[in-house]
Image: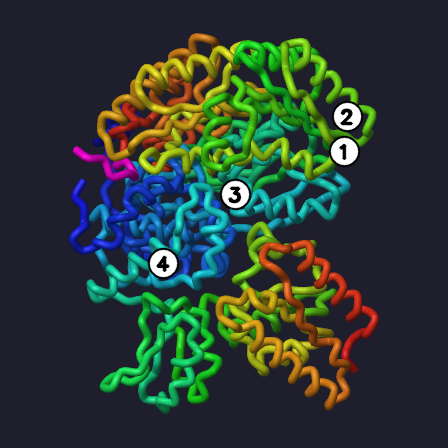
Amino acid sequence: MDLVNATGSSKRGFSMKTIDEEKLRAIVGEANIKTDPSDLYIYGSDSSVHHAMPWAVVRPKTTAQVQAVLRYANEALIPVIARGGGSGMCGQTVPVMGGIILDMKGMNKILEINLADVYCRVEPGVVDDDLNLALKPHGMFFPPTPASSRIATIGGEIANNASGVRSVKYGATRDAVLGMKVVLPNGDLVNLGTRTRVEASGYQLHKLMVGSEGTLGIVVEATLSFVPIPEFRCMGIANFNTLKDAGDAISSIMASGAIPSMLELVDDVAIKAVNKTMNLGLKEVAAALIFEADGMVREAVDYEINKMKAICQKHNGEDIYASYDPKERDKIFLGRKSLFPALSKYDDNLASTALADDMAVPYSKMAEMAGKIHEIADKYGIVMTAYGHCGSGCMHTKILMDTKRKDQWESARKAITEVYDYVRSVNGTTSAEHGIGLSKAESFKIEKADSLHLLSLIKKAVDPNNILNPGKLSQAPEDWVTATNLRYSVNS
Amino acid sequence: MKKNTKAFKRLEKWEGTLANCIRCGYCFEHCPLFKYTGWESDSPRAKIITAFGLLSGEIDPSESAAHKMFSCFYCKRCEAACSSGVKLTEVFTDAKKDLLELGFNGPGTTSTTQMNCARCLICVGACPHEARFYHEGRGVVVDPAKCKGCGICIEVCPAGAAKIQNSFGTGRKELMDRASIFMATHKSAKAIVFACNWSYYPDLQASTLPDTETRDKSYEILVNLCGGRLERQLLMAPFLYNAWGVMVAVCPDDKCEHNGNLRAKELVEDLRHTLKSIRIDPERLRLVQIPAGDKGKFQAEIDTFVDRLNTLGPIR
């Protein structure tokens, strides 16, 4: 399959014959290159359903090495795919057209923590949790905090515009990126953005790089803002007997001017899954909302929490309860926190797959969306949950299915198409925080139909030889099931 | 998809498990091998991917694939952290058995240099996993499927015949080098803490914290695998690098899978006498027992030790 030809951006296919291992060895050194098939096989996977073999894995340690690799790849017309923790859920780092994996975990230094100007400079391989560990003694934190923060790298978070439970208050990665140094496909190094909080100096190209999924440049240094760790944190929970009541509560909270630091929805399928696998004994209601407020002054946090409690009550919320006590907060959050493992252990014959996993819809449609997911799952005989960071409009699902059965993949394909059709019909978006990669390209292309040409012009201007992560985003094939090998054994 | 079930008959039963692993990678931060090399191909997830590749026939059995599967210390922290409840080390063991039958072995387990071996059989008795036995024709041999790489045999062998080819940063020389580098590069450096990987260490840190110019610290934690592998030269080395003190953290009395904590206790007691005899306050060498996962106690013990060292000051 020549995906590049399919998009019309190039007539040329890529061939493994073109790779010069010795050249790469000379650039990064013998200790920083892997070419054995058993190593390459591992780097062909991430947390998505996809798998494809790269031709080499190199681990640059310096900006100069990244530049040299790109100069070589650009000349030899070899795809280059930057990789962080490999925790992507849509196949962003799966080398669908082969090529060189740039393992950026080798560049993992925190270069500067500047408290006077409230920014830090980091290399792209720094793990999110490590940055937060270094910021903590200064009373600060880097706010995007995706669930995968223990392995996700800053470079990967920038590439995907990652966000998480607290993004409702603190924003996504894009909001925290002030500037960056980027190596372009031809090896040139450019400084984008600034170190100031605001900038109106022309195009904000550093913001364009955020979410570009490694298709425009390789980030070799990022300047990030950070925020103070709040003194007080209070978490609450409310149960609802109908999804509609929970949805109305979400919309009302966000419309009321309240500032939650977290607002999470968990549906009945998710609650049952947690009870079934973890025996937590949660009340099996239609939906639960978990809300949190934080701040430096307790009275201000009280104000926010009381406001959210009152709104939940108004919309028939039950068992409403909130606490500042860390142990109580852990107890409240346990159901949500246990969801990920609970879904994996739900049934030995069903695997939890990362598909249709993070769309966003307007607040007023959150409950309807959850209902729609249940309806579609029933229709196709698969298990789907609805949960997510509803404060930022993000809805997660997991599709639980027997991955050995080909018919289940067909069902998943149809279900996903219907889910995304609904999302777009209510002016939602295909991805809230995990990105597009391969598995969401179909819906992405329909959603962005008006601007696809503009996107391809930008890509062509920056990367005329199409070497950076080719075959992704608008270049990805519509049919995600056949885009690559699936990383499961599927009976024919 | 073609399946290699004939060759990997033990792995076959894990087919469902290999699909259930969601490949989130949350096991990375708990794996001492990954932390040491930084290569994803040394992580627990990589072994699961390799097992899937071997079973599905997508990759061929090879030295390199075996190398990955045999490089594991069985600390089982990956299992404890696994989102999907995958029994990773059980998968690894079955893969190892299948690979051995196919004629592949790996350097992550111990072996015996027969030329040096005096056939004293101390290692056979000392191995807590019954991985070593005496064979009339071949001498002391190791069952690589049973060997968990704890290295007790290496420490008890009087002839230096028991070996491990790749100890991923936990060998004596590697630990001494890292202690030396830490003491030389950190202005506030005072203590080296040797910590057993089987119990609490991985809970303490999110992952390997990158060195930064702005970050100074008074102590360094070095993973030494089982406390039973600690030896005199290693525990005394930091003092030569101007450390003010050395702390050894092991599992509580009845919790060590390898009985290494008791060996460590005896060693530290003995060395404290040695320190006293050369007029160094024995308090500068301290052994603490930390229950699994009790990072609060571990941190508190380190803080108390560093406070005490601050009172004692540098060794004159």
Residue under the image location 50 percent in, 21 percent down? A267
Count of residue discs: 4
Dot 1 and dot 2 residues touching (CB under 8 Å): yes
Chain name for mark 2: A
Q: Amino acid at mark 2?
A: Val
Q: Which residues are magenta?
A: A485-492
The answer to which of marks 3 and 4 sits earlier in the sequence is 4
The foreground one among B236 and A112 is B236
Quadrant in which residue A281 is drawn: top right
Q: Secondary structure at mark 2?
A: helix
**Circles 4 and 1: CB atoms closer than 8 Å:** no
Quadrant containing the C terminus of chain A is: top left
Location of residue A101 in the rendering, given as x and y in whole percent from the top left corner:
37, 46
Q: Is residue A151 magenta?
A: no
Going from the N terminus, do you reach mark 1 or mark 3 first?
3
Q: CA distance from mark 2 to mark 4?
A: 56 Å
Circles 2 and 4 in contact, beta carbons < 8 Å: no
Chain under callout 1: A
Q: CA distance from mark 4 to mark 1?
A: 52 Å
Q: Nearer the viewer, residue A130 or A99?
A: A130
Mark 4 is on which residue type? Arg
Would residue A488 be counted in the magenta stretch? yes
In this orientation, which residue lies closer to the viewer: B274 or B41?
B274
Instruction: Classify 10 Å Cα crowding around label 4: few (below 14), some (14-19), many (20 and above).
Output: some
Which residue is disc 4 drawn over? A25
The residue wearing badge 1 is: A232
Residue A301 numbered tag:
2
Are labels 3 and 4 assigned to the same chain? yes
At 52% across and 47% down in the image, what residue appears?
Answer: A125
Secondary structure category for the residue under label 1: strand
How far separated are the C-alphas under marks 3 and 4? 25 Å
